[in-house]
Structures are given as structure tokens and as C-alpha cells.
Amino acid sequence: MNPLFGDRRTTLILVGPALLIYSLIILVPVLWSIGYTFTQGNAISGFTFVGFNNFMELLRDSKVRDSLLFTLKYAAVLTIGQVLLGYLLALSYVFVLRRSSTFVRTLVFFPVVLPTVAVALLFQQLFAIAPQSGMVNSLINTFGGESIDWLGDGASAFVVIVIMDLWRSMGFYGVLLYAGILDIPEDIIESARMDGTNGLSLIRHIVLPLSLPVLVSSIVFSINGTLKVFDSVLALTNGGPGTATSPLTIYMFQTSFNFGQYGYGSSIAFLLTLVCLAVTLVIIRSNKRDLTKA
Amino acid sequence: MVTTAPATKIPARTLPAARRRRVARALPAVVLGTLLGAIILAPMLWLFLGSFKTQQEFLESSVWALPGQWNFDNYAQAWTTGNFPLYFFNTAISVVPALAVMLVLGSAAGFALEVLVWKGRSVVLLTFLAGIMVPVQMILLPLFTVYFRTGLTGTLWPLFLTYTAAGLPLTVFLMATYFRAIPREVFEAATLDGAGLIKSFFLIAMPMMRNALFTVGLVQFFFLWNDLLIALTFVNAGKLRTLQVGLLNFSGQFGSVQYGPLFAAICLNVAIMFVIYLFLNQQIQKGLVAGSVKG
């Protein structure tokens, strides 16, 4: 190896600043945050050491259980929805829309870049009931149905959150998986067609197995994002009605900043980190096992 | 039947059939395209029309009705009452410098991690990678304490600093993968010519990475511009709000919801992204997808 690329001073000058900023603003706070989990208090009142009290409280607190369940439910539903809708979009780009798909792809992708707050406020109005019905309730009325108080009930508010986030993100997964399907060598699909494999069986036996890697990586990406959901729920329902649609992130935010409990807030954030880590590890491990089997 | 038919009749019979077949084959595409277009565009069209309606039209006319007149009163109100110029300035002044610093430092680190040879580089790379997975919630409270104690909470510095750092892991990682594609000989030759390695990083590597820098910058731009969590945590003083925090608080500024101005305010925020998307949609799609696959 050329000694030129082994110069220490150069390395330090190039990697040092980034590493310093990253350490000071990300790494140290992460460790510091773990330290906070053993304390009680906040930035204004100061902190006192309380040992494992916060973790005991985590186990007892029914709100933690509810918001953890909400986070998991949301992540599961949304991951399945995003990857499924994205895959359907991708398949239709490749096999139905074909050459004319560029425009549709670009159009469906557009909501991805929109600010979440703007989209959430728009969906609040779309699903509004009072004082004036939004587009959705008006549609329901047109077909003779009764207006629904979408955001007034936990279950239907969850439906609105899911619809909104799917509307916002399906174009992204469409393009992501589209790229994956395009990577399948043309001649494999062609020769399968020659053999008389067509339509659904072509997709099931040829396209699906060959796009499995990109499917798995989009599932990992989706779960990692949806477990951390914050913006869209905060702006659409603010966790309500009550705490019916409150994920861990919002519970952590309220505990810390509305009630000034940094120690407990850090414990909730730590729990969230553990959940993210565990889910990612499970997926990666189960995926590896499948690969060795095949 | 066809084979026994006179030769002159064949074109007359197959032409419409072929055209019918072509139409039949295009039909699913047309139906699907229209359906998808409607799903995406209907809410936006409704938003756009609503931004011209008066409060009375909102409360009394059908939601399907067109606005009575096309004036910009709602936009004027969203612009002034919603403090649009100030919030736009706050967002831009935190996001743009953060992007610039993040790109320079991130690509320098990416270069050092991929091109240079030193002990511990895989550990450093892994350390950066870990930052992609950790939820932002893990850094908020200590940072808030520090920003509060140092008196930075009354300024936009917390946003600039946090944005820069939060974007670094992905930037470093993506730039490192882009540098992997360039043979070391390129930098070797340049450096032997008498330029130092640092000089050749700035004069050769950076210009070569123009497209990559643009793509990564674009991806990070959307993350930062649309950020709510960090902005909401560190600046809540009215005059320091970013566009997202301002929009979130928009309806709270009136006693009852003023629909027209609210729709106009949402529209303004959508319009910014629309203009950017209009010109750069292909790069944006490629960039965002690349950012996820590698992340």
C-alpha cells in the first residue's frame, strides 16, 4: 500500500471535525441520556439520583404499555401497508404502465417531499366533521352514509393516520421497489415468458423470489422509520383523543417537556431505542437463516 | 377462416382488430394511471380551491363548490398573520448553513474513511453508522439542558448545530460509498504531482463528487426543511419558529379556525416543495431512494 494514504496528520484533519461534531452532539448526548435514566428532574430544577426507579416505573406505567402497543401496532400495519402498496405500485409501473410510467411515478412520489405538518393539516380538513364536513364525509353523505367523527375516536383516528401516512409514503416505496424489479435481468423474465409463464404465476414464481432482497431491505427501512413515528401523529391528532393514538415518541415528548420529567422521558426514549434495536436484529437474523436454508 | 379469406380482405379485417387490441392493452394502464392521479391530486386540488374560499363559503356552501372569486386575501393573511417571511427566513438560515457544513465535513470524513488507510477506520465508520439507527429522542434532553445552560435557547444556533450533526452519519456513509467507486490511483497521481492530499481532496475529489454531493444535499435538504421534532424542541419562542412549527401553530393564532387562511398557509408550504420538485423530480427520487437502500 502506498504510504501516501497512511499519513496520520492528513487523516486527522479530514475526519477530525466531522467526528468531533458527531461525538459532541450525538454520541455524548446518547450516553448522557442513558445517565439521565437513573435520575429525576429537568434542566431547570436540576437532577437527583434515583437508581432504577424509572425502570420500575416503566414496567408499572399503563401509559407506557399503551403507547408501546400503539407504536408496535402502527409500525406493523404501516410497514405491511407501505411495502405491499409499494410493491403493487412497482409491479404496475413495470408490467401495466410500462413506458408511460415515468409521469405516474413522479406524480405518486410527490407527497413524499411535502412537509408532514402541511399534509397532516390537510388531512384534518379532509376528514373533518364540524363545523363543516370535509371531502371524505361529504363523499360518504353523497352515497347515503352517515358522517363519521373520524378524529373523535381512537380507532377511526388510527385509520386516518394510516391512510395519511400511506398516501404520503407509497410513492417512495413504489420507486424503491420499482428499481429492485428493474434490476432483475431481462433475459430471466424473457425466458420464463418463452416457457409460457405469464401473468400472476410469472410474478409469483419469478419476480417475487428475485426481488426478495430489496423487499427485505424496504421492510427493514420501513420498520425503522415507523417505530420512530412522531411528526405525522403529532400534527394530525396530537396523540388524541386522550392518549388513544399516542406512540412512545409523543409520550416521551410530553413527559419530558410538558411535565418536566427528563429522567423518566429518557427512560422512555431508551425503551424506544431498545425496541428499534431488537426489531432490526430479529429481522436481520431471520433473514440470514432463510438465506442459508435456500 | 382467416387463411381461406381472400388476400385483399386481410388488411381490412386485421387493422381494426389490431387497433382494438392495442386499445384493450392500453386500457388497464389508462384506468390505473387515472385512478392513481386522482388519489394523489384530488386532496391537493381541494386544498388549492379551498385556499381561495371565504370563511362564509366554507361554512355554508358545499365542499365541492368552486370559490366565488379568485382573490388572494387568504394568502395575504397567511403571509402576514402567519409570519411567513420570518419563518421562511428562520428555516433557511438554520438549514442552508447546516447543509453546507455537513456536506464539506461529511465528504472529508467519507474520503478519509474510504481512501485513506489508518488503524481504527472501520470502528469509526461503525460509530457513524450507529447514529443512523438511534432515535433522535435519545439526544434531545441532554442537548436541551446544554443549550439552556449556555443560553443558546434564545437563538437559532441549536437548530444549526443539531441539524449539522444529525445529518452527518448518513452523509459520511453515502460519501464513503461514492468514493469507493473511484480508483485510488486518481488521487495518487494528483498527489505525486506535488499537491498535498488535503489539496487534492478539495481540488480533485470534491469536484469529481459534484453529482454525489448534489444528491446527498438534496436528500438532507428535505429531512431538515421538513423537520418538526428538533425545531419544536429547541426553539419555541415565537420569533424563532421555523416554517413547520409556525404552520403547526397557525390555527391556534385565531379564536376559531379561519379556514381560508389556513388552507392558503398549507398551500404556501406545499408550493415551495412543488417548485423544487418541478425542476428536480428525477434527482430527488433517485437520491431519496439511494439514501434509504444504503441506510
Image (cartoon, grey):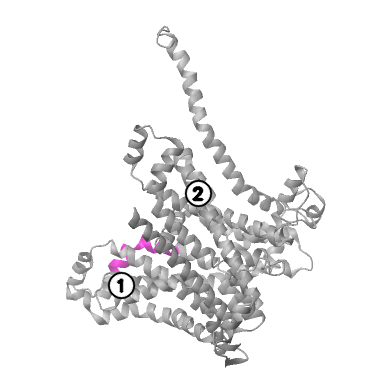
Magenta segment: B203-217
Crowding at label 2, few (<14), some or many (≥20) Cα neighbours within 10 Å? some
Residue B209 lies in the magenta stretch = yes
- Left or right, B30 with reference to A24: right
What chain does mark 2 sit on? A
B95 vs A157, nearest the viewer? A157
In the rendered image, the vertical position of residue B182 relative to residue B106, given as above or below: above
Could you tell me which quadrant the N terminus of chain B lies in?
A: top left
Give residue A289's position: percent from left, percent from top: 37, 60
In the rendered image, the vertical position of residue B39 relative to residue A236, given as above or below: above
**Helix or strand or loop: what does disc 2 sit on?**
helix
Question: How far apart are the alpha carbons under marks 1 and 2?
Answer: 35 Å
- Judge whether residue A53 can be spotted in this image: yes
Give residue B129's position: percent from left, percent from top: 39, 71
Could you tell me which quadrant the C terminus of chain B lies in?
A: bottom left
Residue pictured at 49% horizontal, 74% vertical: A274
Q: Which residue lies furthest to the front in this view?
A: A293
- Judge whether residue B65 can be spotted in this image: no
**Helix or strand or loop: what does disc 1 sit on?**
helix
Q: At label 1, which amino acid type do we have? A: Leu
- Left or right, B10 with reference to A259: left
Give residue B141's position: percent from left, percent from top: 55, 82
Give residue B258's position: percent from left, percent from top: 76, 62
Magenta: main secondary structure equals: helix
**Residue on which the image places disc 1:** B113
**Residue on which the image places disc 2:** A106
What chain does mark 1 sit on? B
B156 vs A28, nearest the viewer? A28
